[in-house]
Image (tube, rainbow, N blue to C red):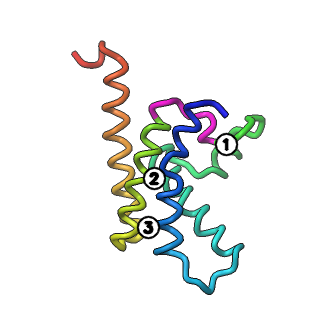
Amino acid sequence: MEPPRTLAKINYRIHTDAIKETLLPPTLTKAQASLVYANEADLLNVALFGETAKQWRDAHPDAEGNIRDHAPLEQLVVLTNLESLNSVLIRQGLGQSERLLELNEIAITQMRTLLAANNPKRLK
C-alpha cells in the first residue's frame, strides 16, 4: 500500500468508533451494520469527491482499486480530516444531511487552501 493511501486510514478508527458507539443500535445484524458503515464512507466520498464509491466504479469500470486509491495527496489529507470531523459531528447528534453540508463546505475550503499552498502562482 502506498503512503498517501495509508495516510487516509489514520483517522479511520476514530470514525468507525463514533459510528459504532452512536449510530449502531445493538439489535442490528452484521449485514445491517455494514450498510451503516458504507453509508458513512459514502457520505465522506460525496462531501469530498462529489460521488459515491459505486458511482465512481460505474464511471471507471477498468480502474483497479476504488475512488480513494486514485485520489491525489491533497484529497487524502482532506479525507483524513473529514473522518475526524465527521466523528465529532456524529457524536454531537447531527443528522446525515446536516453533516454532508458541513463536511462539503470544509472539504472545499481545505482543498482550496492545499491547492493554493502547492501552487505559488495561485497566491497572487
State which quadrant residue 3 falls in.
Answer: top right
Q: Amino acid at mark 3?
A: Gln
Relative image position of residue 105 (x, y in whole percent): 33, 49
The tag on residue 66 is 1
Q: Which residue lies under the disc numbered 3?
A: 96
Amino acid beneath label 1: Asn
Residue at disc 1, secondary structure? loop
Residue at left offset 31%, top offset 31%: 113
Q: Residue at x 77, y 35 (%)?
A: 62
Judge whether residue 69 is colored magenta: yes
Give, as a single range, the part of the protein colored magenta. 67-74
Q: Is residue 58 above or below residue 16?
A: above
| Comparing labels 2 and 3, the label whose residue is closer to the camera | 2
Question: Which of the two residues, 76 or 2, is positioned nearer the viewer here?
Answer: 2
Dividing the picture into quadrants, the one containing residue 64 is top right
Q: Is residue 33 above or below residue 26?
A: above
User: Considering only vertical position in the picture, is 46 above or below 118?
Assistant: below
**Residue 83: assigned label:** 2
Residue lying furthest left: 124
Residue 73 image offset from top left, x and y in percent: 50, 30
Which tag, 2 or 3, sits closer to the chain's start? Answer: 2
Give the dominant element type of the magenta stretch: helix, strand or loop.
helix
Q: Which tag, 3 or 1, sits closer to the chain's start?
A: 1
The disc labelled 2 sits on which kind of residue?
Glu
Q: CA distance from mark 3 to mark 1?
A: 23 Å
Around disc 3, counting alpha carbons within 10 Å, would you say few (fewer than 14), some (14 to 19), or many (20 or more)?
some
Residue 77 point in image, percent of width and height: 44, 37
